Image (cartoon, grey):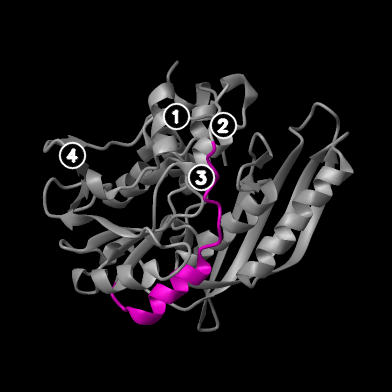
């Protein structure tokens, strides 16, 4: 009885994107709210309204510090929600903005965050059309929390893990780990003197460029909390296929590698906010890479692996040294709150 979920407590690891969060979602929220739309556990819910497929998503953003190289909590909130819509094949149209502000927060900083949201939304071609504001007593919040919800029109239907077949290729639009390391580099207590910017960016234009030229895209996901490794493990979980990655094809900037080596982190598990994993048929993979490389957010696109028959349900990595290792899902948390 002592170890039952009812008698345990929520830890920071339950929000880290790893196995504990995965289990919490499946064993509590999914069971209690069970319905066909939710059970797909996609980045956005796909809702059919009078024959029109609509994507709907929501996310809450808590980050420390709230300003970081390459962005801030406002930009992060807009990009994150846009990207959750884009990866299910939707054209993002409208967002909401709800803020919970701690008493004493400086108006100038709030205005800076809201300006950042405005600029990011305009560049992505979406509008912020509704919202809510709450203020909590000093010491009862953590400066500012932001929730954004979004809706969009589905332009690429039938994106699903169910469509993935052995031989499909895995495509990634650049190097990993910048967002998480950019956040950590701003935390004075770590004493890191590095120049790394978050990759935080709206991906809808890049993704639309792919959808327009290929009907062989099977599935997409943005590797945020839990990083690339977690997303790939979610894809193969309980499936009749596995994934083989090529380590030499997964780009990691030297600055990110250096910090990871110092702190004992694996870049595969670090959050990204401007990356998309695309699984597509082998016949169109090179064409997709070529198109993505023409886009500013896809210049470093590579095919990083493929779907394989064995080992089923596992993600494995062919290392630079010629060996193979299993890339598992983290049980706890590797990094503190970064998105």
Residue 185 bears which disc, if any? 2
Residue 65 in picture, x, y percent from top left? 66, 35
Which label's residue is closer to the chain start, 4 or 2? 2
As helix, strand or loop, the secondary structure at mark 1 comes to helix
Residue 259 lies, with reference to residue 129, above or below; the image says: above
Which label's residue is closer to the chain start, 1 or 3? 3
Q: Which residues are magenta?
A: 195-216
Question: How far apart in space, not on screen, are marks 2 and 1 (Cα)?
Answer: 9 Å
As helix, strand or loop, the secondary structure at mark 3 comes to helix
Q: Are marks 2 and 1 in contact (CB under 8 Å)?
A: yes
Q: Nearer the viewer, residue 147 or 253?
A: 253
Residue 29 bears which disc, if any? 3
> Who's the residue at 31% across and 79% down the image?
215
Question: How far apart in space, not on screen, are marks 3 and 4 (Cα)?
Answer: 40 Å
Which label's residue is closer to the chain start, 3 or 4? 3
Label 4: how many Cα within 10 Å (few below 14, some 14–19, many 20+): few
* Residue 199 belongs to the span the image colors magenta: yes
Residue 41 in picture, x, y percent from top left? 43, 55
Of marks 1 and 3, the one in the foreground = 1
Q: Say which residue label 4 marks.
A: 320
Task: Tell me the quadrant of the picture where the N terminus can be found.
Answer: top left
Residue 119 in picture, x, y percent from top left? 71, 63
In this orientation, does residue 18 appear?
no
Residue 234 in picture, x, y percent from top left? 34, 47
Question: How far apart in space, not on screen, are marks 4 and 2 (Cα)?
Answer: 28 Å
As helix, strand or loop, the secondary structure at mark 4 comes to loop
Q: Quadrant of residue 275?
A: bottom left
> Who's the residue at 42% across and 22% down the image?
262
Q: Say which residue label 1 marks.
A: 259
């Amino acid at each position: 009885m002592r170890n039952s979920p009812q008698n345990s407590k929520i830890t920071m690891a339950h929000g880290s994107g790893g196995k504990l969060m995965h289990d919490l979602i499946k064993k509590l929220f999914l069971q209690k709210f069970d319905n066909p739309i939710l059970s797909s556990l996609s980045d956005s819910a796909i809702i059919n309204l009078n024959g029109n497929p609509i994507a709907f998503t929501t996310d809450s953003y808590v980050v420390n510090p709230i300003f970081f190289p390459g962005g801030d909590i406002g930009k992060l909130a807009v990009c994150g929600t846009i990207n959750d819509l884009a990866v299910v094949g939707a054209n993002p149209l409208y967002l909401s903005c709800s803020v919970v502000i701690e008493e004493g927060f400086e108006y100038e900083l709030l205005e800076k965050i809201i300006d950042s949201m405005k600029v990011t939304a305009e560049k992505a071609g979406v509008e912020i059309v509704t919202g809510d504001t709450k203020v909590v007593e000093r010491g009862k919040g953590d400066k500012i929390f932001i929730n954004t919800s979004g809706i969009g029109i589905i332009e690429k239907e039938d994106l699903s893990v169910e469509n993935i077949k052995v031989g499909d290729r895995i495509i990634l639009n650049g190097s990993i780990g910048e967002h998480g390391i950019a956040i950590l580099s701003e935390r004075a207590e770590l004493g890191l003197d590095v120049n790394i910017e978050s990759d935080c960016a709206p991906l809808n234009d890049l993704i639309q460029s792919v959808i327009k030229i290929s009907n062989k895209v099977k599935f997409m996901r943005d590797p945020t909390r839990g990083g690339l490794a977690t997303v790939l493990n979610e894809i193969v979980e309980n499936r009749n296929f596995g994934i083989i990655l090529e380590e030499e094809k997964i780009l990691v900037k030297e600055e990110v590698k250096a910090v990871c080596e110092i702190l004992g982190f694996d870049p595969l598990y670090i959050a990204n906010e401007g990356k998309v994993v695309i699984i597509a048929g082998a016949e169109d993979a090179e064409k997709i890479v070529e198109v993505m490389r023409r886009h500013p957010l896809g210049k470093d696109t590579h095919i990083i692996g493929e779907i394989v028959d064995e080992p089923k349900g596992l993600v494995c990595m062919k290392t630079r040294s010629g060996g193979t290792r299993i890339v598992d899902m983290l049980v706890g948390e590797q990094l503190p709150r970064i998105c």
